[in-house]
Amino acid sequence: MKALCWQGVNKLGVERVPDPRIQNAHDMIVKVRYTTSCGSDLHLLGGYIPAMEAGDVIGHEFMGEVVEIGPQVTRHQVGDRVVVVSFIGCGTCWYCDNDLWSLCDNTNTNPGITQALWGYEPGGIFGYSHAMGGFMGSHAEYVRVPFADHGAFTVPEQVDDLSAVFASDGVPTGWMGAHLGGVEPGDTVAVWGAGGVGQMAARAATLLGAEQVIVIDRLPERLAMTATHIGAETLDYSRTDVGAELRERTGGRGPDVCIEAVGQEAHTYGPEYLYDKVKQQLRLENDRPPAIREAIMACRKGGSVFSLGVFAGLVDKFPLGALMNKGLTLRGAQQHGQRYLPMLLDRMARGEITTSHLATHIMSLDEGPRGYDIFKNKQDGCVRSVFQP
């Protein structure tokens, strides 16, 4: 089959790879209808995620049709239209039992790498390096789905394929940031990043009852999309002092909840950005953290900060003093999609959450390298490049 493969730093290519097959009784094979790029994929391209190997199939956000099931798959049958959560959960370990699905004890087949990096290993994820299990990714014609009864969900008739693909990762990730960030009715919520995940976090905050939601970015097309489709206020950080503007909009107090949806290659201006970029390029720090730093500084005293953007290692100049002295709560996680997907698909079916506007560029898998080029460089108003294998 054809697949989009990582061939080296900032190098992708479409290759022929072996078709996936059932390997255990809980597997199923899905024929991919749509698979989308994600901002966290850019960290793979840039060489910031360890244990990538030439020929690895990338991609982790997808939906499609079931074409084969293992003998112990009971919730799906051939022909079902499903969306698959990007993180793989076994459904039986302590973490899965407690709805902490991305922390599954049994799905990362290479735990030693992340144990050395982070103390403990998270669960496995499709197409995201051998440090995260080495699973073949979704930018392919077919995908093997382990523990299919727990990770795949039937798409309601009212939800079209293009909308459903974002329920694989972007929608539950955004919802988790608002939910675990502690958004309550009447809150003011600030979201750093107007990409797909940031927009979904903003929408989730609104549905959870936030009175004011402000999304921060610098790209006019993303800010306009956020205002039109999400209904949030917007703030262009290239034109104003973010901290001062947030104080102004909140009567001097600051946001109750700050959600960082950018990750380890965050952009900013001034000497701080040059400092972080040089250190990251020289591998003197793993991650570029200006967005999470700004969120911590901007959050009101006693507020909550949630890190949704992907970080891989160590950051410099982390404002621990602000975190402690302001009495902030800091949380972070990879998405626990299985926890949220049934509820989110129902909301999507009712029209409460819309996602198809995120698919600004739809193309064939053969155009994958070009799709990632325009996605990475934010050309032609690209928010997501979506591929049809």
Image (cartoon, grey):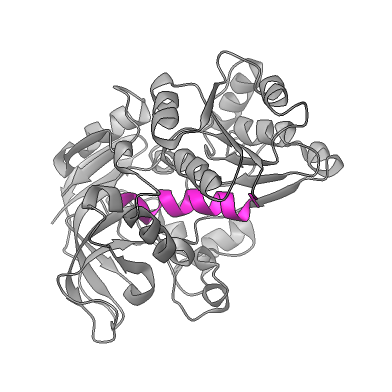
Please tell me which residue lies in front, 223 or 378: 223
Q: Residue at x 62, y 36 (%)?
A: 285
Q: Residue at x 41, y 58 (%)?
A: 344
Q: Where is residue 184 in the image (x, y as percent from the top left)?
A: 65, 50
Q: Which residue is drawn at 26% across and 77% down?
A: 23
User: Residue 169 in magenta?
Assistant: yes
Quadrant in the rendering for residue 316: top right
- How many numbered dots are placed on residues in this image? 0
Please tell me which residue lies in front, 67 or 125: 67
- Residue 45's place in the image compared with 105, above or below, is above
Q: Where is residue 6 in the image (x, y as percent from the top left)?
A: 30, 45
Q: Main secondary structure of the magenta part?
A: helix
Q: Which residue is drawn at 55% across and 45% down?
A: 205
| Magenta region | 165-184
In this rendering, does residue 58 appear at all?
no
Q: Where is residue 79 in the image (x, y as percent from the top left)?
A: 14, 70
- Residue 266's place in the image compared with 386, above or below, is above
Q: In this view, does 7 lie to the left or right of 79?
A: right
User: Residue 61 in magenta?
Assistant: no
Q: Where is residue 298 in the image (x, y as percent from the top left)?
A: 71, 31
Please tell me which residue lies in front, 373 or 225: 225
Name the residue furthest right. Answer: 325
In this rendering, does residue 247 appear at all?
yes
